[in-house]
């Protein structure tokens, strides 16, 4: 039997912080650039994402940066951890990546880093990944998500075909978190206030009068409300799976390490439950 080829760790890109900007009270923009992004390239998706690598405080890695060497020579607790963020924009001429971060004080890892990082600092990242872009053959589009999905939704709106019929719902904490998006499409901003994350989104999508024709749907954000909307769309509205881009970017009560470790199992369970319900409905 042929031996399975050894899986090599992907080579990270090395970038430098070019500039930062506070977009809203809880959204921080960081623009990355530099020669280290010479091999970075997107493939036309509007939900492209990268995985930023963060080493523990006080740990210095040898140069050139090599994940395989780090894993071989450093104890596991000193390996870099990853945090996943959507590419809000990529400029291949300037070779700049724009990333937007939700910031809630000192909570989490990447948000506080984005709030304090200074131009010139080096950032390692993997990617890009991503698979969604608005289908120009769809009769209409539905985009729904919370703050974590806002960059992908904004990029998708800006890439919509001319004249596309689009319904967009974005849930944020309050009016101060709304952003200007370079699109003629109407955006319904839902202010969460003290309500649970995603509750207003589920209500809004449920109340939407679906037009005739084939939709193309993008729903991302906290896993709990995403599960509810997936059931609504697949089981109740009978939207074909191939016309849905729907997944939890994060889950309440879980950091990214824990969520990524359990996400595949969670998604498989949800899909099994809801596909069965769709079949018998």
Image (tube, rainbow, N blue to C red):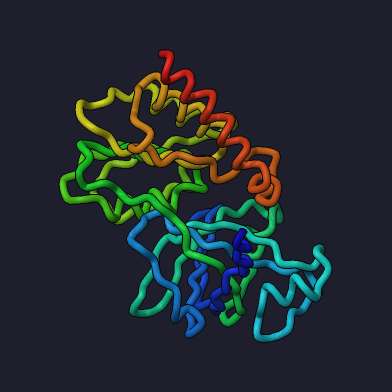
State whether residue 192 is above or below residue 147: above
Quarter placement of the C terminus: top left
Residue 72 is situated, as x and y percent measured from the top left of the image, at: 77, 73
Q: Residue furthest front?
A: 1
Pick the residue in front: 218 or 9.
9
**Quadrant assignment, res 71:** bottom right
Q: Position of residue 186 (x, y in %)?
A: 28, 41
Residue at point 48%, 71% (across, down): 31
Residue 42 is situated, as x and y percent measured from the top left of the image, at 39, 66
Task: Determine the residue positioned at 36% across, 72% down.
Answer: 91
Work out whether 205 lies above or below 118.
above
Q: Is residue 172 visible?
A: no
Residue under the point 26% across and 39% down: 166
Left or right: 27 as drawn, with respect to 63: left
Name the quadrant containing residue 235: top left
Q: State left or right for residue 103 relative to residue 190.
A: right
State the count of labels. Answer: 0
Q: Residue furthest top?
A: 281
Q: Quadrant of residue 12?
A: bottom right
- The reply to whether residue 45 is visible in this rendering is yes
Percent across and percent down for residue 195 are 57, 29
Q: Is residue 257 above or below residue 272?
A: below
Q: Residue at x 53, y 60 (%)?
A: 28
């Amino acid at each position: 039997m042929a031996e399975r080829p050894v899986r090599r760790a992907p080579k990270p890109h090395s970038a430098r912080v070019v500039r930062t900007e506070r977009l809203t009270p809880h959204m921080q923009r960081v623009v990355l650039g530099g020669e280290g992004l010479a091999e970075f390239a997107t493939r036309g998706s509007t939900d492209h994402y990268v995985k930023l690598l963060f080493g523990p405080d006080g740990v210095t890695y040898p140069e050139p940066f090599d994940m395989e060497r780090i894993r071989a020579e450093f104890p596991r607790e000193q390996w870099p951890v990853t945090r996943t963020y959507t590419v809000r924009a990529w400029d291949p001429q300037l070779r700049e990546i724009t990333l937007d971060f939700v910031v809630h004080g000192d909570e989490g890892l990447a948000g506080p880093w984005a709030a304090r990082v200074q131009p010139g600092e080096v950032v390692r990242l993997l990617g890009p990944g991503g698979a969604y872009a608005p289908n120009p053959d769809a009769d209409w589009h539905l985009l729904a998500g919370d703050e974590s999905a806002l960059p992908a939704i904004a990029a998708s709106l800006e890439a919509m075909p001319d004249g596309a019929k689009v319904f967009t719902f974005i849930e944020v904490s309050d009016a101060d978190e709304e952003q200007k998006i370079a699109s003629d499409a109407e955006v319904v901003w839902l202010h969460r206030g003290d309500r649970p994350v995603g509750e207003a989104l589920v209500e809004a999508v449920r109340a939407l009068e679906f037009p005739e024709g084939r939709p193309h749907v993008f729903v991302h954000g906290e896993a709990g409300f995403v599960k509810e909307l997936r059931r609504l769309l697949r089981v109740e509205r009978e939207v074909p799976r191939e016309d849905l881009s729907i997944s939890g970017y994060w889950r309440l009560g879980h950091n990214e390490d824990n969520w990524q470790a359990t996400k595949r199992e969670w998604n498989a369970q949800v899909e099994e439950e809801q596909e069965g319900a769709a079949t018998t409905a």
